[in-house]
Image (cartoon, grey):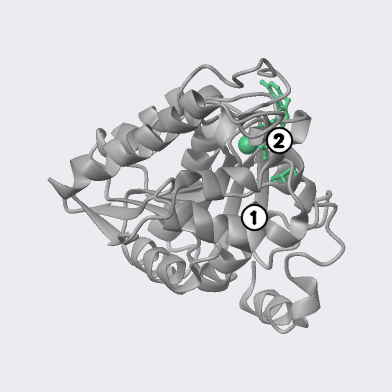
Amino acid sequence: MSEGAFQRMKDLPSAHLLGTGTPMCAGCGGLQALHEVYDVLGPRSVFVNAAGCMTLLSVYPFTPFRGSWLYTAMASAPAGAQGVRDALDILLGQQRMPREEDLDVVVLTGDGAAYGMGLSATSGAIERGLNFLYLCYDNEGYGNTGQQYSGATPHGALTATSHGARGYPGKKKDLFAIWTAHQPTYVATIIGTEPLDLARKVEKARSLKGPRLILALAPCPTGWDFDPQDTAEIGRLAVKSGAFPLKEYVDGKVVHTKRPHPRVPVEEYLRLQGRYRHLFEPSRDEPLIAEIQAGVDAYWAAVET
Ligand SMILES: Cc1ncc(C[n+]2csc(CCOP(=O)(O)OP(=O)(O)O)c2C)c(N)n1
Ligand code: SF4
Ligand SMILES: [Mg+2]
């Protein structure tokens, strides 16, 4: 893009940014996180998007971003990112593009792709040391197609494909650990309801090179079955209960950026969500509530020793 064209786009009123007239659900926690991440990243970014809810943001030939957008199949976003990065590097190497016009290459993906379908392509990209930022908004299911369970669905949650009396029988995969096992440059968890923690981590990720994961918990009123006005409260309770630890990995070390103390019981977080209604109605399922609480307690006991 020429500098003139870039300036003209940059000067558009902010109403042309994300969120205006998008077909997303009210109270979407993934969109909230994306807004905040984009505030830090700015227009010199190209999004490589795996099919999911955020795909609805862009309707060809328009995108709500001031930078560029490439849509890929669910499994292929890291491969798409490799192609874009390579193309930019060739243009820079041949001095056909000034260095100040370089773009941050950002994969934008849901958990269905990040924890499952796209994991092999992601692993390969990290292995190759691809210089990219990987932003996963994790709504803990295949949201765009009706919230089927994914590799990110937590134990006990009801989804369209786990609707028995005890919900999802499996356990959420640890994507943070899967990434850190690859020894990438940077890994962090964020949530839209902690904007300062989020902004600091995205700034840091942006200042580094190599494979970098930003993993956002994305409270999802539609898939988790709660009132859209509760998105912020549910996000806060995810952190205060310890169910969603805020942390980062850099230089081979994991640091928790917020240690909830004292932790509120995890049932306060679960109770607001219809996907856990079977834990409380028609009567309390004490063993399942205790099992979920024990999982959170075990996590923090390991951190604190
Ligand atoms: C290979 C493949 N299988 C299925 C689909 C249909 N599909 C489109 S979006 C989507 C859900 C993706 O889930 P996730 O990555 O968690 O994103 P979310 O929808 O939750 O935002 C599915 C299954 C697809 N596009 N490609
Ligand atoms: S289904 Fe969930 S993640 Fe998808 S747009 Fe709606 S609230 Fe957002
Ligand atoms: Mg999802």
Does mark 1 have its CB less than 8 Å from ligand 2?
yes
Rendered view: 108 above or below 156: below
Q: Position of residue 180 (x, y in %)?
A: 27, 39
What residue do we see at 83% from left, 50% from top? 59
Disc 1 target residue:
29
Q: Which mark is residue 143?
A: 2
Indicate the amino acid at tag 2: Gly
Does mark 2 have its CB less than 8 Å from ligand 1?
yes
In the picture as drawn, the residue positioned furthest to the left comes out as: 305
Q: Position of residue 211 (x, y in %)?
A: 35, 46
Indicate the amino acid at tag 1: Gly
Q: Is residue 164 left or right of residue 42?
A: right
Along the viewing direction, whichever of 147 and 69 lies nearer the viewer: 147
Q: Is residue 272 left or right of residue 182?
A: right
Mark 2 vs 1: CB contact within 8 A = no
Q: Position of residue 148 (x, y in %)?
A: 69, 24
Splitting the image into four quadrants, where does ligand 3 fall? Answer: top right
Q: Position of residue 172 (x, y in %)?
A: 46, 29
What residue do we see at 51% from left, 42% from top? 81
